[in-house]
Amino acid sequence: MRDERRPSLARLTLVELRKATDTRAGFWLQLSVLALGVLVMLISALTGHAGDHSLRQLFSDTSQAINALLPVVGILLVSSEWSQRTAQITFTLVPRRGRVVAAKVGAALLIALAAVVVSLLLALLGTAIASPGLPGTWSLPAGQIGQVALYLAVNMVIGVSFGALLLSSAPAIVSYFLVPIGIAALGTINAIQDVFRWFDQSSMQHITERLLSGNEWARTGTSLAFWMLLPLAIGTWRILRSEIN
């Protein structure tokens, strides 16, 4: 008798992880993310002042460099299903679309966790290469590691959200990079500056550099609700309701 048991969420997440790497675009994109991290680590370690060669600073530099392209992996996790017309196969094998979306988010978080480890290893290597020999060179608060993990995870899920919202790779990638710039530009208008400051994605940029204050966490939380939770909710609704051709 054929086994009718549905695949577990863990198994679906592993399938989504494989999808992220077994395509040519996914492979070269993730290789580019790693290469960018290595390049920034070398530049940071070999240039500048000795005070800039601490583990804390190099960890911030490498994580921000990796984050520059990493969310595109999250976008492709969702949008490639529709761009390459494989969504019909996926949802035929797993009819409950919400489980597929959850697996994609889970895969994105695992990739972000791997990115944190890579960022830390590159920062350790860069600090060893620079060897500034200053007090506190190897100091790295656990809170900063947690904030960097949150930063990379959040941006990966934002990528997934944009992919789900638009269901097309090119518009989602362009929107991911350009819409925050537009919001930031609107935030320079004095009349609405105080309001838009709470929705400016750049409020998260210091999360890799230092421990945030309570007010900064409040602004970051509002920004996350706007950039991550809202598009993810709308995108999930689209995926659950969209017709597949």
Image (cartoon, rainbow, N blue to C red):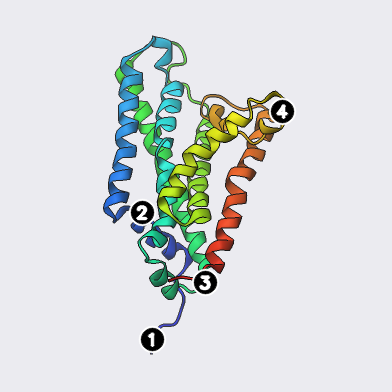
Residue contact between numbered discs 4 and 2, judged by CB atoms under 8 Å: no
Which amino acid, mark 4?
Answer: Asp
Q: Earlier in the sequence, mark 3 or mark 2?
A: 2
Image coordinates for residue 76, horizontal then vertical, percent:
40, 52
Decide which of 57, 83 is in the foreground and name it: 83
Q: Earlier in the sequence, mark 4 or mark 3?
A: 3
Q: Nearer the viewer, mark 4 or mark 2?
A: 4
Label 4 and label 2: CA atoms lie apart by 39 Å
Q: Residue 49's quadrant in the figure?
A: top left
Residue contact between numbered discs 1 and 3, judged by CB atoms under 8 Å: no
* Residue 63 appears in view: yes
Label 4 and label 3: CA atoms lie apart by 42 Å
User: Mark on residue 2?
Assistant: 1
Circle 2 residue? 20
Label 1 and label 3: CA atoms lie apart by 20 Å
Q: Earlier in the sequence, mark 4 or mark 2?
A: 2
Which amino acid, mark 1?
Answer: Arg
Q: Earlier in the sequence, mark 4 or mark 1?
A: 1
Which amino acid, mark 2?
Answer: Ala
* Residue 110 appears in view: no
Residue at point 37%, 12% (across, down): 48
User: Mark on residue 216?
Assistant: none
